[in-house]
Image (cartoon, rainbow, N blue to C red):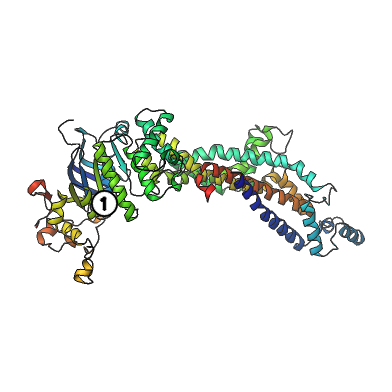
Amino acid sequence: MSGNPLLEVENLRIDLTVGDTRFPAVQDISFTIERGETFGLVGESGCGKSITSLALIGLLRHPLSIGGGKIRFDGREIQNLSPGEMRKLRGNRISMIFQEPMTALNPLSPIGRQIAEMFVLHKGASWREAERMSVEALASVRVPAPERRIKDYPHQLSGGMRQRVMIAIALACEPDLLLADEPTTALDVTVQAEILELIRDLSAARGTAVLMISHDLGLIANMCRRVGVMYAGRLVEERYADEIFQNPSHPYTSGLVASLPLLGARLKHGRQRLKEIAGVVPPVAAFPAGCRFNPRCYAATDICRGQDPGVTPLANGGLVRCHHHE
Amino acid sequence: MLTFIVRRLLQTLPIIFAVAALIFVLFSVIPGTFASSMSEDGRSVLDPEIMARMNKEFGYDDPVYVRFGKYIRQLASFDLGTSFRTRQPVISVIADRLWPTAQLAFASMVFAIVIGVPLGFIAALRSDSWVDMVSMVTAVSGLSLPKFWLGLMLMYLFALVLGWLPSFGYGDGSFRYLILPAVALGVAPMALLARTTRAAVLDIMNADFVRTARAKGMSERRVVQWHLTRNALVIVLTTIGLQFGTVIGQAVVVEKLFSWPGLGSLLVDSVTLRDIPVVQGSILVIVLLFLLINTLVDVLCAVIDPRIKYS
């Protein structure tokens, strides 16, 4: 095992091209994921979490494209790899689970075949061998009676089962990095816990690093060692998960933490309004000048409206992007 | 699977009955009889006595409900009646015309599929390129050209000016005679198929499962082969089935134009002469063909798409 981290993202920019104009949908994103580590990315819808993960796996499609920065995977820059080279990594060493298990599988193909494709593509297996391997893969994600289930079509499975199949596909080739883009958002709460546990167990057993993307801060805190908070295409804070909860630095992070409803709070304090962060994430073409969070920030002053805050290092390797960080 | 086919076939029975009733009502309320149509052109005058005798012979003296009862009883025993004009059983009159129409419809659909489907595929895979533009302009023009005009232009160019193909008629039934009418009839479904295929492929290219396939590390060619084609096929097949029916219906114009001895020209001639049994029989057979083809398409779709069988 080499000494360098598994994934280093440096000043990544993702452009949204509209006509002849390029808007930076994601800008100045830098973070590092160590081998076997689980890193979390949180933020509201539209803040650029998903497209960041798509950029890592080389799946950005027009009108989105990488506009600058570096993505180093296992010491090698991959942002400019040829499509053929990228395909060798994709699915094999970096794989991905998507948000919507209901539509992420081909409705006309038995699930066994969809898992088997991984072994045919990356391991050079024959279809017969691949089918046998897919039974094992299905068993590993705790699907009962896998040898019978491989013949099932996606519509015969529940949402949770389908997400298990997606996990089996993603982990089939024992990748080094798993990108999990809101893997439980579409599922029932009880199923959510099972799926998260599955991802945690399997990635730990295989030494797979995970980039967990979610808008659910509670989930991220539970799963991840370190967390990056994204807002309007920027990383505004990066800390250890427990620190971010106890002592958030960025006003946006504080807002997120405060907006988590607490179970039993009503019994103690009576009926109260749930906390929220007023306003919405601005669209890419209308990012405000200065700090992008300033129109919604309770602590905003003139400097926030005029000057873009740089990155300030915090204790313990944390980072924050705020003029008034606590 | 078998129960699915049987169920689909049984579902067509009420449709056939409804169509039969509709045709019967329609031709009972429109004015004119076989006898009156003989003197309609003004050149010949038919003796009222002969007219009355003809009407009696063909059963026009009976009230409508009696005639309808008779008609349905006939149908139940697969008897389509006797032609007023030729005094032959309608079934055999239609049987003679069925093969040329089948040839024409089949040939025009083959033309439409062989050109339209690949055109739509290429247009979608190269969407927004010049290939896409050219093929879609062709498709829209193909949809908007009136068939009789297109037929005349084809005749003019390939028969009159270039002299490559015969201008009209069935001739000895060889392939050369089939080409022009088949193309005239096939251009519209070709255009429609190209557009539908393009839309279907584009739609599926943006589907989540295609993104999954790409995330697996598949090349675009594999994505198309393994995941896209089958999914697009369901939509394309359905369109083909519907177009087959339209083609048989629209063959009426093309057959008349090219003097093609098919069901369509038989239908037009029989309507003019008020040869009602033949008209009813022809329409019923056309509807039957349409239902049959669509049942076949449904079955094929169920073979491809496992979700259909269970729903």
Residue that appears at 61% across and 44% down: B2
The local secondary structure at tag 1 comes to: strand
Instruction: Report the quarter where the N terminus of chain B lies.
Output: top right
B117 or A258: nearer the eye?
Answer: A258
Identify the residue at horizontal 25%, vertical 60% (top origin): A280
Q: Position of residue B5 (x, y in %)?
A: 62, 46
Location of residue B155 by image quarter: top right
Q: In this view, does A271 lie to the left or right of B185?
A: left
Q: Quadrant of residue A30?
A: top left
Q: How many numbered circles are shown?
A: 1
Q: Is residue B274 left or right of residue A138?
A: right
In screen coordinates, is A149 left or right of B189? left
The front one of A138 and B151 is A138
Give the vertical position of B236 relative to A266 (above or below): above
Vertical order, A308 against B305 (above or below): below
- Of all chains, the one bearing label 1 is A
Q: Mark 1 points at which residue?
A: A214
